[in-house]
Amino acid sequence: MDTPTPLSASCLCGAVKINAIIKSLEIGVCHCGMCRQWAGSPYFALESDNVTLSGDSVKAYDSSEWAERGFCGNCGTHLFYRMKGSETYYLPVGLFPTHQAMTMSHQIFIDSKPEYYSFEQKTVCMTGEEVMAQFAGDNQS
């Protein structure tokens, strides 16, 4: 399912335009407390290394020592999550038109998921410790 797909979107007010080549139509879900607080729910995202953001309203918030979260400074629409120094963006799936081929494939910080919701789909699930170990391994190459 790793078929690069060009997608376009805009924020709610239209001040920010997004053009991205999505790596695949596999949706990842993050259950960490920070993503849930930021998104108001789990963070559903598509991954891309090829993103163009245009408009004067793009703002970024340093949410940790290693990551930032982008949003429109006018309407507040969430635009991306990304590791600092990386060109990989995790874009909210809700920005883009739904494609029949979209599927939820994996969940991270599964150990932080509250008990009050669950998903029917069976996916790859990683704990916070497993995710951090993977990121540490990626940064050593």
Image: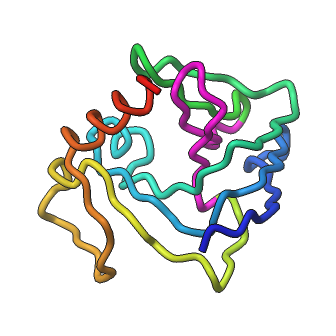
Q: In this view, does 56 lie above or below 51?
A: above
Left or right of 114 on screen, residue 38:
right
Residue at position x 53%, y 55% from top? Answer: 45
Q: In this view, does 99 lie to the left or right of 82?
A: right
Tally of numbered tags: 0
Report the span colored magenta. Answer: 75-94
Task: Tell me which corner region of the image, top left, top right, bottom left or bottom right, holds residue 59.
Answer: top right
* In the rendered image, the vertical position of residue 37 relative to residue 86, given as above or below: below
| Location of residue 116 in the rendering, given as x and y in whole percent from the top left corner | 16, 65
- Give the x, y percent position of residue 41: 37, 54
Q: Residue furthest front?
A: 141
Please tell me which residue lies in front, 117 or 123. Answer: 123
Residue 65 picture location, percent across and down: 40, 14
Q: In this view, does 48 lie to the left or right of 14?
A: left
Q: Which quadrant holds residue 88?
A: top right
Left or right: residue 52 versus residue 118 is right
Asked whether 28 or 34 is in front, the reply is 28
Residue 74 appears at what percent x and percent y? Answer: 73, 31
Tell whether position 132 is magenta: no
Picture residue at 78% right of the left edge, 27% below the top: 57
Whether 67 is drawn above or below 82: the answer is above
Up the image or down, 105 lies above or below 120; here it is above
Q: Quadrant of residue 133?
A: top left
